[in-house]
């Protein structure tokens, strides 16, 4: 389920979904990161929490979008 949630958020970000839809998907992801904390990069989670907020949300900013995508896709430790 963690992988499915990562993929879900990735797609929503890439296709420019609204903040509300992405925030909802992020909340779902956080439920799994709490349970699977030993395979998740905690620094990435904390940075994502600071970026997925209404005042900073701007998918038109390519640096912002790239950073979120990078963090989402490097969230799971291998």
Image (cartoon, rainbow, N blue to C red):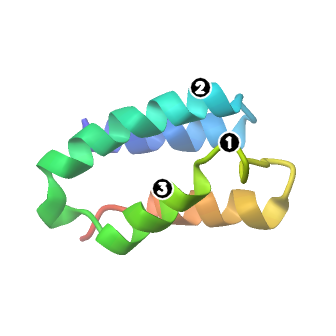
Residue 48, x across and y down, in percent: 50, 59
Q: Residue at x 62, y 34 (%)?
A: 12
Q: Residue at x 72, y 53 (%)?
A: 56
- Label 2 vs label 1, nearer the camera: 1
Residue 74, x across and y down, in percent: 42, 66
Number of marks drawn: 3
Instruction: In the rendered view, tell whether residue 49 sits above or below residue 26.
Output: below
Residue 32, x across and y down, in percent: 23, 42
Q: Is residue 15 left or right of residue 21?
A: right
| Secondary structure category for the residue under label 2 | helix
Per the rendering, the mark at residue 49 is 3
| Secondary structure category for the residue under label 1 | loop
Structural crowding at the residue carrying mark 1, measured as other residues with C-alpha within 10 Å and reported as few (<14), some (14–19) or many (≥20): few
- Residue 19 occupies quadrant: top right
- Residue 20 occupies quadrant: top right
Residue 27, x across and y down, in percent: 40, 36
Pointer 1 residue: 54
Pointer 2 residue: 21
Q: Residue at x 16, y 59 (%)?
A: 37
Dot 1 or dot 3: first in sequence order is: 3
In three-dimensional space, the C-alpha distance between marks 3 and 2, rounded to whole angstroms, equals 15 Å
In three-dimensional space, the C-alpha distance between marks 1 and 3, rounded to whole angstroms, equals 11 Å
- Residue 11 occupies quadrant: top right
| Secondary structure category for the residue under label 3 | helix
- Label 3 vs label 2, nearer the camera: 3
């Amino acid at each position: 389920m963690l992988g499915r949630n990562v993929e879900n958020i990735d797609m929503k970000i890439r296709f420019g979904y609204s903040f509300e839809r992405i925030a909802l998907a992020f909340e779902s992801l956080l439920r799994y990161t709490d349970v699977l904390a030993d395979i998740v990069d905690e620094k990435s989670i904390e940075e994502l929490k600071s970026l997925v907020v209404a005042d900073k949300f701007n998918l038109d900013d390519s640096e912002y979008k790239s950073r979120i995508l990078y963090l989402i896709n490097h969230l799971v430790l291998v």
